[in-house]
Amino acid sequence: MNPQYLVQGIFLAAGTVSLLAAILNWEWFFNTRNAELFVRTLGRKGTRIFYGVFGLFCIIMSFIIGNNQP
């Protein structure tokens, strides 16, 4: 298996989860230790925006990685 596909899949999965968590306001996602740091500093709405943008970035990166085939 080409490692490129593994990296592409990881970016796509992480982006999808982050974007869905931001849109659907998943309580379990925003109660994790890492997300609580952002919630304390940015507030819940700011954290949702951050993770939404981060999710879109990861999804876009997965498509860019997929299009860079030799």
Image (tube, rainbow, N blue to C red):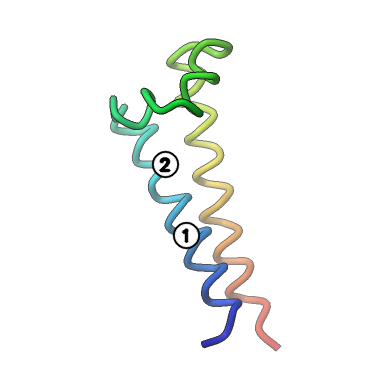
**Residue 36 position in % (x across, y down):** 47, 19
Q: Quadrant of residue 19?
A: top left
> Which quarter of the rendered picture does the C terminus lie within?
bottom right
Residue 59 numbered mark, or none: none
Residue occupied by mark 1: 12
Q: Which residue is found at the position 56% from the left and 66% from the top?
A: 63
Residue type for callout 2: Leu
In the rendered image, the residue lying farthest to the front is 33
Q: Is residue 41 left or right of residue 45?
A: right
User: Could you tell me residue 47's position as x and y percent?
Assistant: 49, 22
Mark 1 and 2 residues: CB-CB less than 8 Å, in contact? no
Q: Which residue is mark 2?
A: 19
Report helix, strand or loop for mark 1. Answer: helix
Query: In the rendered image of this protein, does residue 63 appear above or below residue 31?
Result: below
Residue at image position (61%, 59%) is: 61
Which structural element holds mark 2? helix
- The kind of residue on which mark 1 rests is Leu
